[in-house]
Structure formats: C-alpha cells, structure tokens
Amino acid sequence: MATLTTDLTVVADRPGAKAKVRYVRMSASKVRVVLNLVRGKRVEEALDILKFSERLAAQEVAKCLRSAIANAYHNEEIPAEELYVSVGFADEGPTIKRFRPRARGRAGRIHKQTCHITVEVTRMSETELDELRTVAELKAKGRQSQAKSGSASAGGDRAKRVAQSKAAAAGSDAVDDSNDVDDDTGIDAGEEE
C-alpha cells in the first residue's frame, strides 16, 4: 500500500513545496519515464500530459503532483497558475521477495519492486510571471474585440457565408431553368423537335 507524505521546501530563494508517495508497487525505472515527461513544465500542462498518458505510473505521479500543488497553496499561498514542476525523481524502495513453485520441486524467485516518488513544485520567476500575465491580457483584449465587432465566433461567420452561398446558388438555379437538359438523353429540350 502506497503512503503519501509531504514536506515544505524552498528551492533557490523561490518558495515551493514537495510531496512524496512512498512504497508504490511499481519499478522505479517505469516511473522515471513518466517523470521525464513532466519535469520543467507548468503544473497545468503537466497534469494534462499525465491525464492522457497511457502508462500506469502516470496515475501515481499525478497524485503526487496534485498533493505538491495543494501543499504550495496551503503552506505558501501560491496559486497553481504560478507553479512549475522543478524536481521529480523516483528512488527504489524495498523489494518484496516471493517464491513460485517450479518443476521438479524447485522454487523460482519473484522480486516485487517498490519505489518512492518525489515531486517538487516551485514558483516561477517574476519575468516568467510577467510574460504569462501579458499573454492573458492579450487574450482578454482579443475576446473583447471579437465581442465588439459582432462576430462572437468563427462558427457564426461560417454560418453567414453558407447562407449567402445557398442564396446565391438558389438565384443561379432560377437563371439556369431556361436551358433545361433532359437528364436521360443529355439533349436540350429545344433540340428534341
């Protein structure tokens, strides 16, 4: 059974927090592959990566990451939008040894490996936070300008274009009625006589 422990740390004069999940019944090498995917990423992006990962280790890493985010919010009052995954590693835990009966009275060894997962989140630097804020402001201005111009979405514009093209097609059908072509023979109605 995996147990969850949490610790508060400060990394390089930037506040943050860490969390550990201990005695996970999985090999440390399998967990390290998943940790390599999220190390250095913002926490929202890291959670998305873990959500769509097909590896079973992603569930344990996500649990540890969510705990670290909660620790940062509770202990340091840092919102999740300002955090990134600064450290993530998996150490080997104790190996549970079991035996399986084999042929001719022998016994085969089975090693059930465990590991300890540690994830640490740290607050982004002020320059990175300023960049994120400017991007958020630009997105907000873009949404406001779309709302003011009357085009709430690209889908609304497309609906107008489709309606216009249908109206134009209906108008051209009315003009083309004079040149009727018999569908069976391919001969104009005026040439049959």
Image: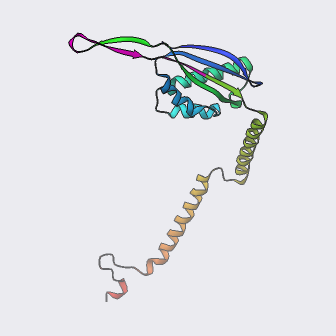
Q: Tell me which corner region of the image, top left, top right, bottom left or bottom right, holds residue 69.
A: top right
Residue 161 on image: x %, y %: 58, 61
The residue under the point 40% across, 16% down is: 111
Q: Is residue 60 left or right of residue 108?
A: right
Residue 74 on image: x %, y %: 70, 18
Q: Answer above or below: position of 125 versus 98.
A: below
Outermost residue to the left = 104
Q: Which region is colored magenta?
A: 103-118
Q: Magenta includes 57?
A: no
- The quadrant of the image that shows the C terminus is bottom left
Nearer the observer, 34 or 111 = 111
The residue under the point 76% across, 33% down is: 125
The residue under the point 34% across, 14% down is: 109
Q: Tell me which corner region of the image, top left, top right, bottom left or bottom right, holds residue 40.
A: top right
Q: Answer above or below: position of 5 versus 122.
A: above
Residue 12 on image: x %, y %: 75, 25
Q: Magenta includes 113?
A: yes
Q: Answer above or below: position of 85 versus 128.
A: above
Q: Answer above or below: position of 116 versus 134.
A: above
Q: Is residue 97 left or right of residue 155?
A: left
Nearer the observer, 98 or 107 = 107
Dominant secondary structure of the magenta stretch?
strand
Outermost residue to the bottom = 193
The residue under the point 57% across, 14% down is: 4
Q: Tell me which corner region of the image, top left, top right, bottom left or bottom right, holds residue 136.
A: top right
Residue 137 on image: x %, y %: 75, 42
